[in-house]
Image (cartoon, rainbow, N blue to C red):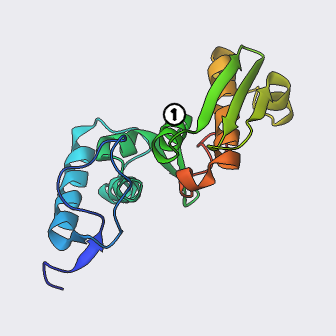
Amino acid sequence: MDNEATIMPTEGAMPTMASAPAKRWNETTVDTWKVMREQAAVFIKSGFLPAHIKTPEQCLTIMIKGRELNIPPMQALAHIYVIGGKPACSSELQRALVYREIPGAIFKCVESTNEKCVYEAARPGTSPALFTFTLEDAKRAGLLGKDTWTKYPRNLLNARCSSEAARTVFPDALMGMSYTPEEL
């Protein structure tokens, strides 16, 4: 394979979350692939990555998924997880993808307490739908025995509610990352 072969998205500086939609998968050269492999090795050696990323290969795989979504490497490494071979992302990244990919979308939290969260979501030109996730829903799902649910119920209700709204109304914006790590 020569250096002009194409195997990944665009080369050059990584775009920000607010930049234009991702370019085609096959627009990056072998040189960019090599740079990403070197970056992955450095990132692993740095010790600054989340604990679940243990090898350069895991790091590189997450960076590639981030490139597919037009997300800079460090943001991808902080918000994308691979669970059972399936990519998942934080609820914050899901919301950012919706805001970036669907101009004019309605996607807002209308209520957030330690007992309940409600999101309103709609595509441009459609009527909003309400999504609710309650402490009772978390109990039925067997989530309340986990330590984080005891310490941060409002935050976790928000994450579950927003991810349900995002995957129901904006699945195209999530591009296959419809669930948060906690849901998988």
Q: Residues within 10 Å of mark 1 (few under 14, many from 20)?
A: few
Q: Position of residue 101 (x, y in %)?
A: 48, 47
Which amino acid, mark 1?
Glu
Please name whichever residue, 18 or 54, is drawn nearer the observer in this view of the structure: 18
**Is residue 60 left or right of 120 when viewed as pictured?**
left
* Residue 79 sits in quarter: top left
Name the element at disc 1.
helix
Q: Position of residue 12 (x, y in %)?
A: 17, 56
Q: Is residue 160 visible?
A: no
Q: Position of residue 34 (x, y in %)?
A: 18, 65
**Is residue 154 left or right of 13 when viewed as pictured?**
right
Tally of marks: 1
Taking the spot 50% from the left edge, 38% from the top edge, the residue there is 99
User: From the viewer's perspective, is residue 155 above or below residue 65?
Assistant: above
User: From the viewer's perspective, is residue 161 above or below residue 85?
Assistant: above
- Quadrant housing the N terminus: bottom left
Taking the spot 58% from the left edge, 39% from the top edge, the residue there is 105
Q: Is residue 155 visible?
A: yes
Mark 1 lies on residue:
92
**Is residue 68 left or right of 27 when viewed as pictured?**
right
Please name whichever residue, 35 or 146, is drawn nearer the observer in this view of the structure: 35
Q: Position of residue 61 (x, y in %)?
A: 38, 59
> Farthest residue in the bottom direction?
1
Taking the spot 53% from the left edge, 42% from the top edge, the residue there is 98
Taking the spot 48% from the left edge, 38% from the top edge, the residue there is 96
